[in-house]
């Protein structure tokens, strides 16, 4: 059942039936719906998260990740716009990013 959940969710994401930002059912709810153990759903969600298909956001839930990279681009544009509006130069911004990079 674990592999079936992984296959079904990843196929639905690839086909566009689960677009980026879609909130997936909580593990307990999906387990009850499928009449399986909660740990089976949790394991499938962990595997999908490692594969980059979904992301857990703590108490807010589990969501489909943006597969196109558009979310990262939007964040970069937001960051650059903020830094520019603060009057920070490109060189200073890059220096800040380098120091903050893990």
Image (cartoon, helix red, strand yellow):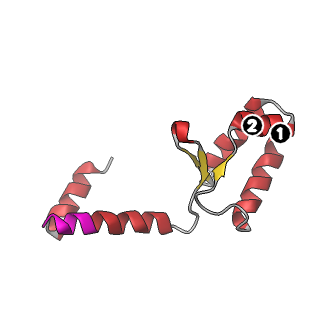
31 w.r.t. 88: above or below: above
Judge by depth and name the residue closer to the eye, 72 or 50: 72
Dominant secondary structure of the magenta stretch? helix
The answer for how far apart the CA atoms under marks 1 and 2 are is 6 Å
Q: Position of residue 88 (x, y in %)?
A: 14, 65
Q: Are marks 1 and 2 in contact (CB under 8 Å)?
A: yes
Give the image location of residue 39, x and y in percent: 74, 30
Q: Which residues are magenta?
A: 81-87
Q: Residue 42's x, y, as percent?
A: 69, 36
Secondary structure type for disc 2: helix
In this rendering, position of residue 86 left or right of residue 52:
left
Q: Compared with residue 79, is residue 61 higher up or lower down, i.e. above or below?
A: above
- Indicate the quadrant where residue 22 lies: bottom right
User: Would you call the spot at circle 1 few (<14 residues within 10 Å), some (14-19), or many (20 or more)?
Assistant: few
The quarter of the displayed image where residue 81 is located:
bottom left
Foreground of the two, 50 or 73: 73
Q: Which residue is mark 2?
A: 29
Residue 33, which numbered label? Answer: 1
17 left or right of 68 in image: right
27 or 91, which lies in front?
27
- Percent position of residue 91, x then y: 16, 67
Asked if the stretch drawn in magenta spans residue 69, the answer is no
Which of the 4 quarters of the picture holds residue 18? bottom right
Say how many tags the image has.
2
Residue at x 85% of width, y 41% of height: 1
């Amino acid at each position: 059942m674990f592999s079936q959940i992984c296959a079904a969710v990843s196929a639905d994401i690839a086909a566009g039936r689960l677009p980026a930002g879609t909130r997936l059912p909580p593990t307990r709810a999906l387990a009850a719906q499928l009449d399986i153990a909660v740990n089976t759903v949790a394991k499938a969600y962990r595997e999908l998260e490692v594969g980059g298909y979904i992301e857990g956001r703590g108490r807010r839930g589990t969501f489909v990740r943006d597969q196109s990279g558009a979310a990262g681009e939007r964040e970069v544009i937001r960051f650059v716009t903020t830094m520019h509006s603060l009057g920070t130069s490109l060189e200073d911004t890059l220096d800040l990013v380098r120091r903050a990079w893990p």
